[in-house]
Amino acid sequence: MPNERLRAVMASGGWTHADLADATDVDPKSVERWVNLGRTPRRTTALKAAEALGEDVHALWPALRQARAARAVSPELVALYDQRADLPVSVFAELLAQGRQQIDVLVYAAVFLHEAYPRLNDLLRERAAEGATVRIALGDAESLNVQQRGQEERFGHGIESRCRLALMHYQSLIGAPGIELRRHGTTLYNSLYRADDQVLVNAHMWGVNAYAAPVWHLRRTREGGMFDTYAESFHAVWETARPVEG
């Protein structure tokens, strides 16, 4: 299908195929394909052509706008859930069970894991025994940031007690080969559950308990993407955290 808009603009300005080819550093046959076959040039070339013709690039090639919208969704996004409560705990357990090299958990408490999946510690031991490095970062109940979160979520001292309860749940893993527990006092913007190149990110929202906040599932597909950003965030918190000793 010919690009009638491009054809009309070129005709009104007296542009030939050769003229536009010179302005965009392409072969005249490429311009012919744009006009007669409706082909869409690369974005950089389209911008050159639009500037030369004094037109809006998306008006000349609507497909560019569509492609841009498509790219707005990260290729690393596997799934997006309205709230954590929508996910059965088996989703978290199955993800962690896939970890062969690295398992990282960054939370304040997340006691829902042990409450709904009592085998969690056994699973982590099994993964560590198979060679995975397991790192668990829990909230420090004495941290002002943890206490502030309790006030913001209208949970009061409950969040502090849950941090202590979480530590009790993981207590038997202290000193286990390949597993390390630490306590952190950072402001927690997201809870992270990572297994190798996949991570479940539970976002945190002011005044909303974590179970009612969204979760997105990411899989690493490229260097420097969203997955790497969250992995670096975990590392930064881990460096500030204090080891839990038996």
Image: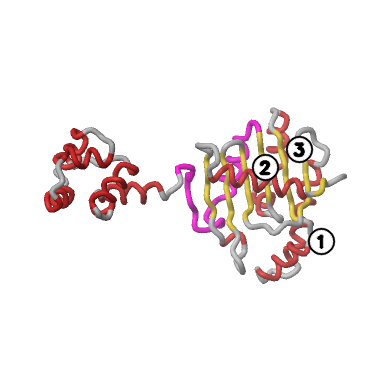
The amino acid type of the residue labelled 2 equals: Asp
Q: Residue at x 72, y 67 (%)?
A: 148
Kindly identify which residue carries mark 3.
179
Q: Residue at x 52, y 46 (%)?
A: 217
Pick whichever of labels 3 and 1 is earlier in the sequence. Answer: 1
- Identified at 73% across, 48% down, the residue is 137
Per the image, the residue denoted by label 2 is 104
- Gap between marks 3 and 1 measured at Cα: 23 Å
From the viewer's perspective, is residue 31 above or below residue 186?
A: above
Q: Quadrant of the N terminus?
A: top left
Query: Which mark identifies residue 142?
Result: 1
Q: Earlier in the sequence, mark 1 or mark 2?
A: 2
Q: CA distance from mark 3 to mark 2?
A: 10 Å
Q: Quadrant of residue 142?
A: bottom right
**Pointer 3 and pointer 2: residues touching (CB < 8 Å)?**
no
Disc 3 residue type?
A: Ile
Quarter occupied by the C terminus:
top right
Residue 86 in picture, x, y percent from top left: 52, 55
Q: Is residue 13 left or right of residue 62?
A: left
User: Does any portion of residue 25 appear in the rendered image?
Assistant: yes
Which residue does the image show at 63% across and 31% down from the upper left?
100
Q: Where 99 sits versus 8, above or below?
A: above
Q: Earlier in the sequence, mark 3 or mark 2?
A: 2
Magenta range = 75-101
Tell me the crowding category of disc 2: few under 14, some 14 to 19, or many 20 or more residues within 10 angstroms, Cα based.
many
Residue 47 image point, x, y percent: 31, 47
Magenta stretch containing residue 162, yes or no? no
For residue 229, which numbered disc appears in the image? none
